[in-house]
């Protein structure tokens, strides 16, 4: 997902690997401009491009087919890949995201209006606020320094702060090194500039029809006909009833289940339930 990295799935993947009746290799990947891709920042982040990144990994590693599991932004990447290259996808699990465009509220002195109630407004605000922190100019030397700034009105939720700070690396001091001992493992400029693309959805670099008044009115002749399993957080607003017809138009053989009482970070809030559902899907 956005601002996540492959370590977010590490414990889940490890637990799942020991529970499958049909064992298989499990890989966790960093999407572009995230994690260990610091040597290769990219200016563009369309879903078609990120889907091709995953396909390039499969090709390089010799995987003709794979089941793809993705959360949030990663879930959109997974959906785009399945629609672009259905012959390469043995199954698809999408965690709390739909193949639709999400909208932010627009605020002025009279208040806020618009938006879709999904939570995308908060996500965009977090990205823009954290991206504006210049750790070198402010002279921060520890993650605690950054945490204190985040706590002051930007990110009051300690769990969200901890999640964001997984993208901050504490460097080992070297003799004669006068640079900052901290480094972001995330390309903030690239992500901020591409927030519109990330909020949307595209296949083969073609943006889904945004001229329709409602997502449910959109239609497509591009389909993935394999089994698709959507896992929705009951307290999240990223998968709404109005999006079901769009989901069905892309994925006619989909199934949706809800884990009650959990928000958008389904696999973090309910790891055991998520593993049980993944095991049932993979061992089907």
Image (cartoon, helix red, strand yellow):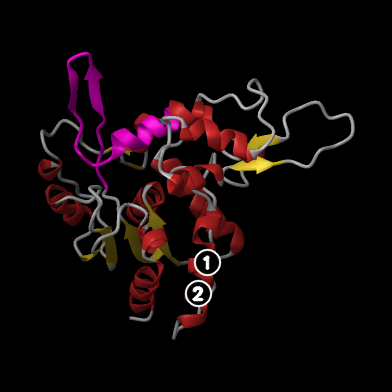
Q: Nearer the viewer, residue 5 or 111?
A: 111
Residue in front for this viewpoint, 195 or 144: 144
In-image side of 166 versus 80 (left or right): right
**Segment tinted magenta in the rendering:** 99-128
The residue identified by callout 2 is: 15
Q: Is mark 1 in CB contact (under 8 Å) with mark 2?
A: yes
In the structure shown, which secondary structural element does the residue marked by tag 2 occupy?
helix
Question: Left or right: where does residue 147 sit relative to residue 178?
Answer: left
- Does residue 43 show up? no
Residue 181 lies, in percent from the top left, at 73, 34
Is residue 177 in the magenta section? no
Taking the view exactly as shown, the residue that stands out farthest to the bottom is: 21
Residue 248 position in % (x across, y down): 17, 56
In the rendered structure, the answer to whether residue 131 lies left or right of residue 283 reads right
Above or below, comparing residue 104 to residue 84 in the picture:
above
The residue under the point 54% across, 39% down is 33
Please state which of residues 56 and 148 is positioned toward the viewer in this rendering.
148
Determine the residue positioned at 52% across, 30% down: 149
The residue at the point 46 percent across, 82 percent down is 19
Residue 229, how many percent across, how many down? 28, 65
Question: In front here: 194 or 258?
Answer: 258
User: Residue 127, position in %: x, y?
Assistant: 43, 32
SS for tag 1?
helix
Q: Is residue 74 visible?
A: yes
Q: Toward which corner of the image does residue 71 lie, by quadrant?
A: bottom left
Return the residue found at the far right. 175
Label drawn at residue 179: none
Of all residues, the one furthest to the top in this rendering is 109
Q: Which residue is mark 1?
A: 11
Quarter of image, res 226: bottom left
Q: Residue at x 50, y 28 (%)?
A: 131
């Amino acid at each position: 997902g956005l601002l996540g990295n492959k370590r977010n799935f590490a414990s889940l993947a490890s637990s799942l690997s020991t529970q499958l009746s049909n064992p298989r290799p499990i890989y966790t990947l960093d999407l572009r401009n995230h994690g260990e891709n610091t040597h290769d920042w990219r200016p563009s982040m369309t879903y078609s491009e990120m889907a091709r990144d995953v396909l390039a990994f499969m090709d390089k590693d010799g995987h003709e087919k794979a089941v793809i599991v993705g959360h949030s932004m990663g879930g959109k990447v997974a959906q785009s890949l399945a629609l672009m290259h259905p012959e390469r996808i043995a199954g698809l699990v999408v965690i709390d995201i739909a193949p639709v465009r999400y909208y932010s509220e627009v605020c002025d002195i009279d208040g806020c209006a618009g938006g879709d109630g999904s939570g995308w407004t908060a996500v965009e605000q977090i990205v823009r606020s954290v991206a504006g922190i210049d750790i070198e100019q402010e002279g921060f030397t520890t993650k605690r320094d950054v945490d204190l700034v985040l706590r002051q009105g930007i990110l009051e939720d300690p769990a969200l702060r901890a999640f964001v700070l997984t993208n901050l690396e504490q460097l080992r001091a070297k003799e004669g090194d006068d640079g900052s001992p901290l480094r972001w493992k995330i390309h903030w400029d690239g992500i901020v500039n591409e927030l519109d693309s990330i909020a949307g959805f595209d296949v083969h670099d073609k943006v889904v029809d945004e001229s329709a008044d409602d997502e449910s009115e959109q239609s497509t002749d591009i389909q993935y006909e394999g089994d698709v399993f959507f896992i929705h957080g009951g307290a999240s607003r990223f998968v709404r009833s109005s999006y079901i017809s769009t989901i069905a138009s892309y994925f006619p053989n989909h199934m949706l289940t809800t884990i009650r009482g959990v928000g958008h970070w389904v696999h973090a809030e309910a790891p055991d339930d998520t593993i049980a559902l993944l095991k049932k899907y993979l061992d089907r």
